[in-house]
Amino acid sequence: MSLVVQKYGGTSVGDAARIRSVAKRVAERRVSGDSVVVIVSAMGHTTDELIRLSTEVSPHHHPREMDMLLTAGERISMALLAMAIRDEGVEAMSLTGSQAGILTDTSHGQAKIREIKPMRVVEGLESGKVVIVAGFQGVSPDTKEITTLGRGGSDATAVAMAAALEADVCEIYTDVDGVFTADPRVVPEARKLDEVSYDEMLELAAAGARVLMPRSVEFGKRFNVPIHVRSSFHDRPGTWVKESAMEQAVVSGVAHDTSEAKLTVRGIPDTPGVAAAIFTALADAGISVDIIVQNVSSGGLADISFTVPRDVLGQAVPITREVAAGKKAASVEVDEAIGRVSIVGSGMRSYPGVAAKMFSVLAGAGINILMISTSSIRTSCVIAEARVEEAARLLHAAFQPPTAPGEL
Amino acid sequence: MSLVVQKYGGTSVGDAARIRSVAKRVAERRVSGDSVVVIVSAMGHTTDELIRLSTEVSPHHHPREMDMLLTAGERISMALLAMAIRDEGVEAMSLTGSQAGILTDTSHGQAKIREIKPMRVVEGLESGKVVIVAGFQGVSPDTKEITTLGRGGSDATAVAMAAALEADVCEIYTDVDGVFTADPRVVPEARKLDEVSYDEMLELAAAGARVLMPRSVEFGKRFNVPIHVRSSFHDRPGTWVKESAMEQAVVSGVAHDTSEAKLTVRGIPDTPGVAAAIFTALADAGISVDIIVQNVSSGGLADISFTVPRDVLGQAVPITREVAAGKKAASVEVDEAIGRVSIVGSGMRSYPGVAAKMFSVLAGAGINILMISTSSIRTSCVIAEARVEEAARLLHAAFQPPTAPGEL
């Protein structure tokens, strides 16, 4: 008898047949004796449809009303799922984020969960019901306004709810079998990981693995909620994200990403505060900068390179040029055709040879490394976009993740 | 400077262009200095779409979840309307029924409004905002569950909100110009009434006029809220429904209806309680009976005739047959091809010749009267369905409503 929080995304509840199939799975779990809370996203393209409707009505941004509008999406899917579960002979009730006690801050469209007061969820569970909770939404106790959590919000709802209920597991259902050692579309030899630590999952997610958003992994880590990422199409186990095992893999996975661009400010005079000026201006515009590399060239002039998401390049370039000109830098160069390849593994902490092996593999294939960034359990290289997938395959073949220490 | 509650139905907010056009009208009213609360229904066919989706998912009836599902409809329209009003340069915010303090009983799908505690509406108005409130929905304080009000619910929300706010007027926007002296599709000479009393409107609605549901008129009467029924396509005044004027029309309008069927139980032995048994059994099945006529035929045997909505005939007939058999009545006859034509007018109270004139008009055209039912301000005749529209035209021509006393 466990307490299980299950999360189903928009594709899993995309139409009536899929909703009935999710209902069957949920009902079976309940009948087997477990208590079940289900977090559900809006059906398939509902959110896109509502956004399209809003742009037809108004060219402007109305964050409060947008949240009111978008929260209609989960309301529909959760009510339908509750009906379908009841049809399986299992009592069920749906609750909005507000009814489920998901309390957030006041920022519409990207609210953060502050606290969960799941009184009605607990009441429902105690009376034997499956409780279905709308993902992605909450309420601000300060303003009494409905809020949405932004990208990855439903996963965050699920893990936070599991933490608040002290659930035994948070199951994230998805259209893949779990977390892989690399993207199987690019690296055919990629294998499913049975287990990965929170820290590794955070690095993999940040390095381009799309299966779980960093946000929900952070919740899991902070409250020690075991997360089971698994397929909604079959019953085989997926990947457990949890406290790391005793013996850790040196390399758990290879991740890659081609969504960023590189900016280089050249010929910066050796005066303090240039880097601070650039990154403050970018942060003020809401632009997050990823990898930053600075080196001093001959003559005392410095170069700074950094990466930003390509979709904000149109904002980032003029801001950077303005600051650079003010600081008498020589030039600003833009390179959109870059990508990043990363290796991630908790055991990397104790095995310093890993990064060196990565550089040799890339060098051996004639792949030029433009930037390097490391954490204690990750090494990333920025390279030409055209070589990214090849690099992922080469690194996967070289490390054969999950790599036990003896295999290095 | 008045406080105005405006209600727009599903057709008025059926697409983005119509929402923008309603927004313009609302904003102009606000800019003119009035405080404005808007009650809005779900867009066009949204409710039908959601019902279709629910039948795809489940063949069964889940009242609580159905209310959760359907309330997504107004959530969408109200958020979009708030955006469009803001685009007109007027501050606006949308509120769900629950947020607007619309407190109902616990019956899902057909909840009754118990009380309105419009704190957030008042706050919004005080800060100069247009407040948009979801029609058709509320919350039960006993169960904390979301409820819907059933048929005519948005009109009821509007009039009840106007009563709670002590608004100067409740404007019901619709696709016709107001309340007519007869159905203009059947009686081309029908004229728009400038004014009609609550009681007359109640009788007209009960007799088949579709423009306002009796439910909202009852609210208006009880709390003395002036209701202005008007077109959303132009700015000309419509019909005011309010306390009757000093000099009342003898006949305000002619209404007709063909949605009922007639049941006759023949040869009932003269024992007490037969009528009670029949109508108790029907009421227990939730069937509302309209006109009832009883007469005693020769030999002490009685006949009872009554009308029920045609769409519940399948239930009503077997129930009636069973009770009739138990009471040793001779037979039960069913006539579906009937209709009703009514004349309504407050002045009728003082002019007893009106009913007589109505019967003569029908008799003069060879139209046989099957049943008669009267109230102090209405006379209705049940006749053959095939003659109903003709009868409406003849009566309209004979009385020329609104009929002043001198014109009788």
Image (spheres, coloured by chain):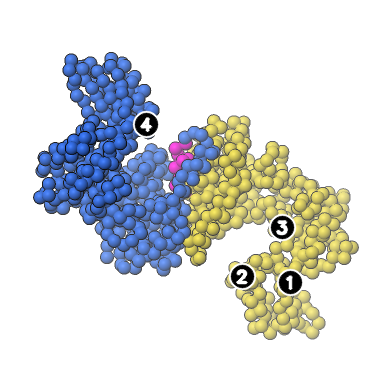
Chain colours: A yellow, B blue
Q: Are marks 1 and 4 in contact (CB under 8 Å)?
A: no
Q: Which residues are magenta?
A: B62-72
Q: Amino acid at mark 4?
A: Val
Looking at the rendered structure, the secondary structure element under dot 2 is: helix
Q: Alpha-carbon distance for marks 2 and 4? A: 66 Å
The numbered mark 1 sits on a residue in which chain? A
The residue closer to the viewer here, A72 or B122, is A72
In which quadrant will I find the N terminus of chain B? bottom left
Of all residues shown, which one is farthest toward the front?
Answer: B365
Quadrant of res B324: top left
Secondary structure of the residue carrying tag 3 is loop
User: Residues under labels 2 and 3: Cα distance?
Assistant: 22 Å
Q: CA distance from mark 1 to mark 3?
A: 19 Å
Q: Which residue does the numbered mark 1 point to in the structure image?
A: A335
- State which mark lies toward you, 2 or 4: 4
Which amino acid, by three-letter code, is at mark 1?
A: Asp
Identified at 64% across, 76% down, the residue is A318
Residue topped by disc 2: A283
Type of amino acid at the residue the image marks with label 3: Gly
Point out the tag, 2 or 3, that comes first from the N-terminus: 3
- Pick the residue in front: B369 or B11: B369
Q: Please report the residue visible at 25 percent of the width from the left and 53 percent of the height from the top.
A: B192
Q: Which mark is residue A208?
A: 3
Instruction: Confirm whether residue A133 shows in the render.
Output: no
| Residues tagged by mark 3 and mark 4 found on one chain of the structure | no
In x, y percent, where is residue A264?
73, 75
- Label drawn at residue B312: 4
Crowd tier of the residue under label 2, counting other residues whose Cα lies within 10 Å: few below 14, some 14–19, many 20 or above: few
